[in-house]
Image (cartoon, grey):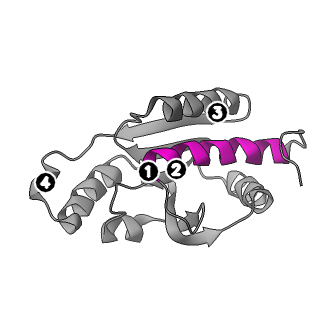
Amino acid sequence: MKITLAVIGKTEVAFVRQGIEEYVKRLGHYVSFNIQYIGDVKSTRKMSEAQQKVAEGKALLGALETSDHVVLLDENGTERTSVDFSVWLERRMASGSKRLVFVVGGPYGFSPEVYARANEKISLSKMTFPHELVRLVFVEQLYRAFTILRHEPYHHE
């Protein structure tokens, strides 16, 4: 199985980008993982929040394959502990899907069309984080999940 993190726009903050690069490198020992950058929507000052979500949604949907299992990283999604997430991940990987795609939306969230396409939603926290920081937190949690599954000493409970 391949795992993809689909995000709107590039990661601009240097320390966040460095952290992401470190965990992506570590993930290479466990799984085929990549980050798919979807271009920012242009001329957003002239758009309402709803119009921006729709435009971003079209770009996100265009990057998905029909067979993808799509998981939105959404504040209203299911919250899991790191151990529970690792168990969930193991089950998803055994399900036979070719690609598991986690999606970080734009600043206003997801369009109704993206919600309709999603197979499920996961919340990293009830708190609100900058979208770039969500990328780093997610790749760290993905790495943590693999170390938990392999009984490696990274995670402590």
The quarter of the rendered structure image containing the C terminus is bottom right
Q: Position of residue 110 (x, y in %)?
A: 36, 64
Residue 138 forms part of the magenta stretch: yes
Quickly name the residue at label 2.
134
Numbered disc total? 4
Q: Main secondary structure of the magenta part?
A: helix
Q: At numbered mark 3, what does the secondary structure look like: helix, strand or loop?
A: helix
Q: Closer to the camera, 64 or 44?
A: 44
Q: Quadrant of residue 79?
A: bottom right
Q: At numbered mark 1, what does the secondary structure look like: helix, strand or loop?
A: helix
Q: Position of residue 22 (x, y in %)?
A: 63, 28
Q: Position of residue 78 (x, y in %)?
A: 61, 71
Quickly name the residue at label 1.
131
Q: CA distance from mark 2 to mark 3?
A: 13 Å
Residue type of the residue flagged with mark 3? Tyr
Q: State if disc 3 and disc 1 touch (CB < 8 Å).
A: no
Residue 18's place in the image compared with 57, above or below, is above
Q: Is residue 151 left or right of residue 97?
A: right
Residue, x 46% and y 29% (percent of image)? 14
Residue, x 50% and y 31% (percent of image)? 17
Q: CA distance from mark 2 to mark 4?
A: 24 Å
Q: CA distance from mark 1 to mark 3?
A: 17 Å
Looking at the image, is mark 1 or mark 3 earlier in the sequence? 3
Residue type of the residue flagged with mark 4? Arg
Closer mark to the observer between disc 1 and disc 3: 1
Tell me if mark 2 has few (under 14), some (14-19) or many (20+) residues whose alpha carbon lies within 10 angstroms of its own.
Answer: some
Look at the image and give the residue range highlighted in magenta: 130-148
Q: Closer to the camera, 155 or 103?
A: 155
The reply to whether residue 67 is visible in this rendering is no
Residue 80's place in the image compared with 44, above or below, is below
Name the mark on residue 45.
4
Looking at the image, is mark 1 or mark 4 earlier in the sequence? 4
